[in-house]
Image (cartoon, rainbow, N blue to C red):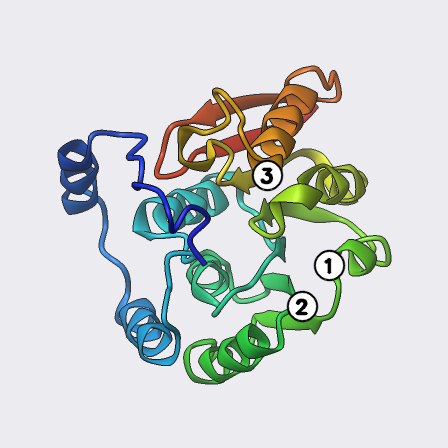
Amino acid sequence: MKKHRDKPFVHITNWQIENYALEMTSPESASIQELVASSDEELDYIDMLSGNLVAQLLKMLINISGAKRILEIGTFTGYSAVAMAEALPDDGEVITLEMNIRYQDLAEKHFAKYDTAKKITLLKGNAQEIVQELEGDFDLVFIDADKLSYQHYYEHSLPLLKQGGLIVTDNVLWDGTVLEPQDYKAEALHQFNRFVLEDERVEQVLLPIRDGLTLIRKK
């Protein structure tokens, strides 16, 4: 669901520049394009899909870092999980967490069709609880779930991360509303961004890509 359906959409980056960036970025695979079309047929809104700029950045990070084991918190219909799996070596693994039953069903259908190498494992249930039960080590964590719980996910996934590993958090600008938070989600994300900034265990860079993306490296 779009977070501000009753308000005008705020482009973090000039929409013409963003479109140009998309045109000059490696395209989605045929499998990902089919997954997007399938998601669009099944759901009224698919704006929670990460989008190709984010997906290609994730794939680039995986390739550069040599990541093999990935944790994703927030599956939606499987877009980013499939994209990341495409970048992994044959012995790579994506563990993805999803609570919404409708999204679980769609993701399972997409994984069965597009994750032919069986690199993706979907864990169903409350991510706040599951993340506390997991064991490391992960090379990369992608957080794109309940915005109010970002700090919880971060605190519990950081110990699972290898030294030098990455946490990537999506939607950290929340349509720009973190600048002057007027609702609880914007305030929660602003507080999370401030928390990460002051966390001496990591170093980070917040990128104004789509709805804001923070790359966090564990020291």
**Which residue is depicted at the point 48% across and 84% down?**
109
Q: Secondary structure at mark 1?
A: helix
Q: Distance from label 2 to label 1 (Cα)?
A: 7 Å
Please tell me how crowded label 3 is: few (under 14), some (14-19), or many (20+) other residues with Cα within 10 Å.
some
How many marks do you count on the picture?
A: 3
Seen from the viewer's position, the closer of residues 47 and 50 is: 47
- Amino acid under label 2? Met
Q: Earlier in the sequence, mark 2 or mark 3?
A: 2
Left or right of residue 20, residue 86 in this image: right
Q: Secondary structure at mark 2?
A: loop
Q: Quadrant of the C terminus?
A: top right
- Amino acid under label 1? Ala
Left or right of residue 29, residue 195 in this image: right
**Which residue is depicted at the point 51% across and 75% down?**
107
Please, is residue 186 above or below residue 75 in the view?
Answer: above
Q: Earlier in the sequence, mark 1 or mark 3?
A: 1
**Which residue is depicted at the point 37% across and 57% down?**
47
Check the image and name the residue furthest to the front: 6
Q: Distance from label 2 to label 3 (Cα)?
A: 19 Å
Q: Distance from label 1 to label 3 (Cα)?
A: 18 Å
Quickly name the residue at label 2.
Answer: 99
Please tell me how crowded label 1 is: few (under 14), some (14-19), or many (20+) other residues with Cα within 10 Å.
many
Q: Which mark is residue 185?
A: 3
Seen from the viewer's position, the closer of residues 166 and 3 is: 3
Q: Which mark is residue 127?
A: 1
- Amino acid under label 3? Lys
Q: Give the image location of residue 75, x and y in percent.
A: 56, 63
Left or right of residue 123, residue 108 in this image: left
Q: Give the image location of residue 59, x and y in percent.
A: 42, 49
Please, is residue 134 above or below residue 201 in the view?
Answer: below
Q: Nearer the viewer, mark 2 or mark 3?
A: 3
Q: Quadrant of the N terminus?
A: bottom left
